[in-house]
Amino acid sequence: NKSSVKNPIYTYSSPNQYVVTLIVTTGLGCVDSLTRSNIVFSSPIIKPLTAIDGVCYGSNVYLGGKNIVSAGTAPFRYLWSPAIYLNDSTISNPEFKAPVNPSSAQNYSEKLIITDVNNCRDSAFHNVSVLPKPIILNVTGGKLCFGESTVLSNEIINFNGKLKFKWTGASNISDTLFLSSTADSLPIFKATLNPAEFSFTEYKLIVVDGNACRDTSKSVAIAQTYRSQISQLLSRLCL
């Protein structure tokens, strides 16, 4: 390839060592030349980063990967931005954490720049779509005499689609025997235990929405006792 301009621009098609010669001829026919060797390095290439779609808020999400670079010369330096959502912005596969629980799907885009030992670089974006996580605001407990019943009510917000409910015994799976159903939104608790004094039964509620995002409640306690022991129970609960 030849050029007759003073400062030509040329793009090399592949890495290699190239010899370039500059020949200058004056108007009087005088000639001089200068030869230089140019080394062209292979640039790193980031492999395609598949978008991460439909992850629930609070889930563990890792960007990039272990082997995401082809070509170039190791060692490589990694730089992700914005760094505020990442546990480490200088590794190949940092953990991403969304800053807030969205009310609808929220999209984030993290830019990755990879630089090799020769200061050649490549960049790409890794996109993440975060889904809202349902929130259990409260689950009601209660105090019952033997033979009485109550409904376990709850309040849930920030969910999408139809909710699925699962009630579990917080400490003993057999505790669910007191419930009319472990899959109802408002199950009935019946005090069928005949305690010597009083006893507590604890439950947790797990909800899963239409996006398969879930939340788990804190333990809620229900006390069972004789009718004659209500005043004694209340005094103990207030201590």
Image (cartoon, grey):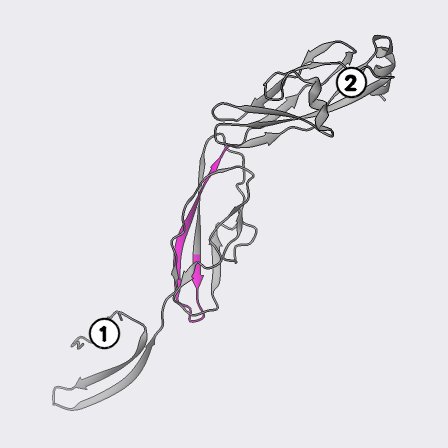
Q: Tell me if residue 31 is in the magenta stretch.
A: no
Q: Is residue 12 above or below residue 52?
A: below
- The amino acid type of the residue labelled 1 equals Asn
Q: Is residue 107 left or right of residue 220?
A: left
- The amino acid type of the residue labelled 2 equals Ala
Q: Quadrant of the N terminus?
A: bottom left
Q: Nearer the viewer, residue 225 or 30?
A: 225
Q: Is residue 77 left or right of residue 13?
A: right
- Please tell me how crowded label 2 is: few (under 14), some (14-19), or many (20+) other residues with Cα within 10 Å: many
Tell me the tag on residue 97: none
Nearest to viewer (mark 2 / mark 1): 2
Q: Position of residue 133 (x, y in %)?
A: 54, 32
Residue 14 can be seen in this image: yes
Lower position in the chain sequence, tag 2 or tag 1: 1
> Residue 51 occupies which quadrant of the picture?
top left
Q: Which residue is mark 1?
A: 7
Q: Is residue 62 above or below residue 37?
A: above
Q: Which residue is mark 2?
A: 223
Q: Position of residue 196 (x, y in %)?
A: 87, 17
> Residue 69 occupies which quadrant of the picture?
bottom left
Q: CA distance from mark 2 to mark 1?
A: 89 Å
* Mark 1 element type: loop
Q: Residue furthest left?
A: 28
Q: Quadrant of the C terminus?
A: top right
Range of magenta residues: 113-132
